[in-house]
Amino acid sequence: MVRGGDLRLDPSPLLMAVLNCTPDSFSDGGLWSGDQAVEHAQACVRAGARIIDVGGESTRPGAERIDAPEQIRRTQGVISALSAWLRTEGRNEVAISIDTTRAAVARAAIEAGASIINDVSACTEDAALAPLAAAEGAGIVLMHRVLEPTHDRWSHEHGSSLVEGDIVDAVAAALAARVADVVACGVARGSIAIDPGLGFGKTVQQNVALVAGTAQFVAMGHPVLVGASRKSFIGAITGESDPALRVSGSVAMHLEAASRGAQLLRVHDVVEHAQALAAWRAIRELA
């Protein structure tokens, strides 16, 4: 699912490390920019991350939108420096993704060395993004969401969702439609991963159901990315209000998704997830 075919989904699942170059992300806003961001990414690679997901706009509930030039300012230099380091270290197995809904940001990131576009809008915000991915041969992650972050605070605060009926069926149908539209724009099916979009307008119960229903998404024939890391629904389940202290709950959710076939896990805490996956794999090898 990545330009040049360097990214192999083995051993599965792979860890995608979150690198938010933002001042307002929900759990690590303001921590990573410039050289510090590059150093953190390097540490994530050494710990076992196979993808570094660089973002310049927060997608937390209620977040303000950031224009493309500012997203580029926050991310392009970091991606360029990280890409150069990966080449120097011979780490061809590690890819860089850009977390954006804007084609201009994605283009700048690809020019700097990114090879995957992680779009939480599933190419609904910017009509130029899917054709860009097709032209560049970039991998693309299509995520399901009910509301964009600016309007998501209501559902976040009230625990309500606009999705009726079976949440897994509804999200699978919506993702299938987005895959079809992106393929129609010229993106190769083998370049597409899908993400059920934990959070993003779903209730606590719906988020849990989506993790439990991972196999249904896997059956759609694309790598499935699951990103439960530190999210508020884990806080609601565990009673932990501090996102940074939701690591154990995040690991538990991700191991359940992995056991149901998820191939990509988007995480903040790479060391803890890498250790948990090593133990998980050791057990599965005996099964």
Image (tube, grey):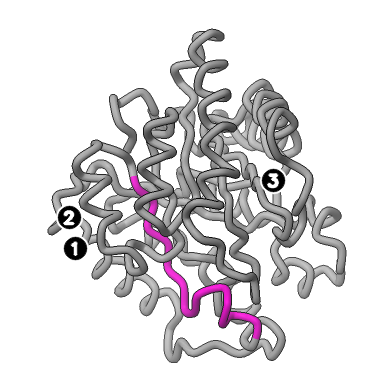
Identified by mark 3, the residue type is His
Above or below residue 69? Residue 236 is below
Task: Report the side of 56 relative to 12 (left or right).
Answer: right
Callout 2 crowding tier (Cα within 10 Å): few <14, some 14–19, many ≥20: some
The range drawn in magenta is: 140-153
Q: Residue, x 49% and y 90% (percent of image)?
A: 162
Question: What is the secondary structure assignment of the residue under circle 1?
Answer: helix
- The quadrant where residue 165 appears: bottom left
Q: Which numbered tag is attached to residue 183?
A: 2
Q: Residue 142 lies in magenta, yes or no?
A: yes
Q: Residue, x 41% and y 66% (percent of image)?
A: 121
Q: Quadrant of the C terminus?
A: top right
Task: Report the side of 36 relative to 184 (left or right).
Answer: right
Question: What is the secondary structure assignment of the residue under circle 2?
Answer: helix
Q: Are marks 3 and 2 in contact (CB under 8 Å)?
A: no
Q: Are marks 1 and 2 in contact (CB under 8 Å)?
A: yes
For the question of whether residue 287 can be seen, the reply is no
Above or below residue 196? Residue 171 is below
Q: CA distance from mark 3 to mark 1?
A: 31 Å
Query: Which residue in the structure is indicated by mark 1?
Result: 180
Q: Which numbered tag is attached to residue 268?
A: 3
- The quadrant where residue 196 appears: bottom left
The percent coordinates of residue 233 (x first, y second) are 70, 71
- The quadrant where residue 54 appears: top right
The percent coordinates of residue 92 (x first, y second) are 44, 17
